[in-house]
Amino acid sequence: MADGGPGHGQDVRRGCRVSGSARLDTSVAHNARVWNYWIGGKDNYEVDQRVGEHVAGMFPLIREIARADRWFLGQAVRFLAQERGVRQFLDIGTGLPTADNTHEIAQRVAPESRIVYVDNDPIVLAHARTLLTGTAEGVTDYIDADVHDPAGILERAAGTLDFTRPVAVMMLGILNFVLDFDAARDIVRKVMADVPSGSFLVLTHPTHDSEVGGEGQIPAMKFWNENATPPITARGGKEIAAFFEGLELLEPGLVSCSRWRGEAESLAVVPQYGAVAVKP
């Protein structure tokens, strides 16, 4: 994720408040748009399609990873809303809106749910203005902010979320863009330190672990880092598990995201770990 930059404005439409600045570069493939291409979306450019096809040729599982990550999002949000009564979600690194976004799933269970999306890709911002609209009972917000600035994210999210009540912090496929491990772990610690007991961390992250087929990600990520933005890294399961230090992992723990609390029969085991943990 690139820096959010100055010049934030605010747009209020049909229950969706949006703030951000315009920075759109269509000459270089960008993760949000390539990911959209892999899951069959239309919000991408030729450069994104070209790089996406090359990566998929090197590592065919990438499309399965994209679909499995999306499936995991649905599983986790439904579980938290239905079984744990969560009514607040902070979705950091939301990416481009598609079908069944976090707010749609949560508000289908509980229309009063409040969701704040965080991203800083300008094409995501443009789509958020029209697509990330929620129920009349709840609130759906979008803030243009950088994952490297957790304090700023929390400060602005506090305009919508009540941080005296539990919050589900969603970090799906975002910490892999924070290349320094200690910096990534500090981001999680700072965010989770500011949410109350009973809050949740929902996280997915690509891995190079061979037992889930992750070794093929290494050359594909090298190509990505040379031809697209932002740069990305995979991590081993032990490193990814460290993001949950001080939290209590829910069953089944850290697993391939296509195997979390029920198997997605149409999806293979993928080298993308997923887990949900609660803050004691």
Image: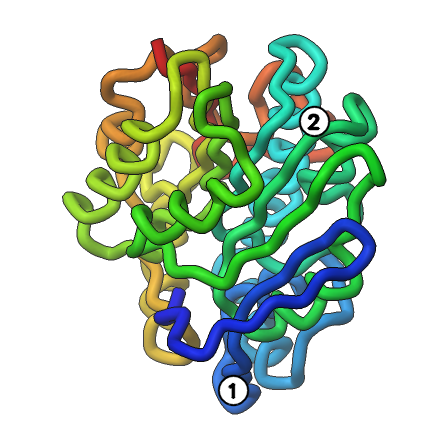
Q: Is residue 41 above or below residue 216?
A: below
**Element carrying mark 2:** loop
Q: Residue furthest bottom?
A: 27
Eyeballing the image, is 168 above or below 139?
above
Q: Is residue 16 above or below residue 44?
A: above
Give SS at disc 1. Answer: loop
Q: Position of residue 205 (x, y in %)?
A: 41, 41
Residue at image mark 2: 264
Mark 2: amino acid: Ala
Comparing 242 with 255, the one in front is 242
Where the C terminus falls, by quadrant? Answer: top left
Disc 1/disc 2 C-alpha distance (Å): 36 Å
Q: Could one spot residue 7 in this view of the protein?
A: yes
Disc 1: CA contacts within 10 A as few (<14), some (14-19) or many (>=20) = few
> Residue placed at 38% from the left, 60% from the top?
146
Q: Amino acid at mark 1?
A: Asp
User: Would residue 266 be found to the left or right of residue 169 on screen?
Assistant: right
Seen at 62% across and 35% down, the residue is 73
The residue at the far front in this view is 159
Q: How is the image coloured?
A: rainbow
**How many labels sit on residues?**
2
How packed mark 2 is, by other alpha carbons closer than 10 Å (few <14, some 14-19, many 20 or more), is: some
Of the two numbered discs 1 and 2 in the rendering, the one whose residue sits closer to the viewer: 1
Residue 45 pos. (x, y %): 66, 82
* Residue at 53%, 70% in the rendered image: 20
Which label sits on residue 25? 1
Position of residue 169 measured from the top left corner of the image (x, y, whole percent): 47, 33
Closer-to-camera residue (244/34): 244
Considering only order in the chain, which callout, 2 or 1, is on the residue closer to the N terminus?
1
